[in-house]
Image (spheres, rainbow, N blue to C red):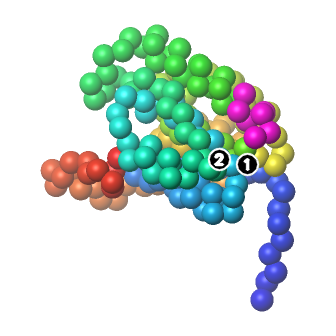
Amino acid sequence: MTEYTQQSKGLVIVYTGDGKGKTTSALGMCIRAAGYKKKIKIIQFIKGTWHYGELDGIKLLSEYVELEQMGKGFVGIIDDKEDISTHIRAAQVALGRAREEMLSGKYDILILDELNVALKLNLVKLEEVIDLIRSKPEKLHLVITGRNAHEQVIEAADLVTEMREIKHPFQKGILAQRGIDF
């Protein structure tokens, strides 16, 4: 039997791709880590105007997990009435908050949900994201989710998983479902 040892190196983990499951994977890690009494901070970059089931689920783990919705909703789609400058400001504030929380020493894991999307939409600058990754404390695990991960983010990561859509219920006219999709 292989003996496992405790590692003290924090990883940079990226969940990307056009398939579903990026945020869900990060939340699964969050549940696992909370089971070990790890402290987790989640900052959501794009999500912010809809009610998602994870908001209520995370409350059940509130002793170990904090979640902040900092986005102003989906950019340019699905009922977006905000000017792009509002989204840029919100993403910049979220990135500053991420750096502050990352360096606070309070957390074992920092999840930056939809940061890849904010980067792809030019709401934040690549240099700022790469600098954030490089500034990560040694023991902190940094998780970045969202489609279209930039090649430099992928290069800076220790683990990258790409979700690939093979089949989706929307193709059959089945809309997003509470508790499954949001």
Q: Say left or right for 89 vs 82.
A: right
Query: Residue sitting at 72 percent across and 44 percent down?
Result: 107
Q: CB atoms at circles 1 and 2 under 8 Å apart?
A: yes
* Kind of residue at disc 1: Asp
- Seen from the viewer's position, the closer of residues 161 and 89 is 89
Does residue 8 appear anywhere in the picture? yes
Q: Position of residue 44 (x, y in %)?
A: 52, 35
Q: Say left or right for 79 vs 36.
A: left
Q: Position of residue 171 (x, y in %)?
A: 20, 52
Q: Position of residue 178 (x, y in %)?
A: 29, 50
Q: Say left or right for 13 vs 139.
A: left
Residue topped by disc 1: 108
Q: Is residue 15 above or below residue 35?
A: above
Magenta residues, as a range? Answer: 100-106
Q: Say left or right for 10 vs 176.
A: right
Query: Residue sitting at 79 percent across and 83 percent down?
Result: 2
* Kind of residue at disc 2: Ile
Residue 103 part of the magenta-drawn span: yes
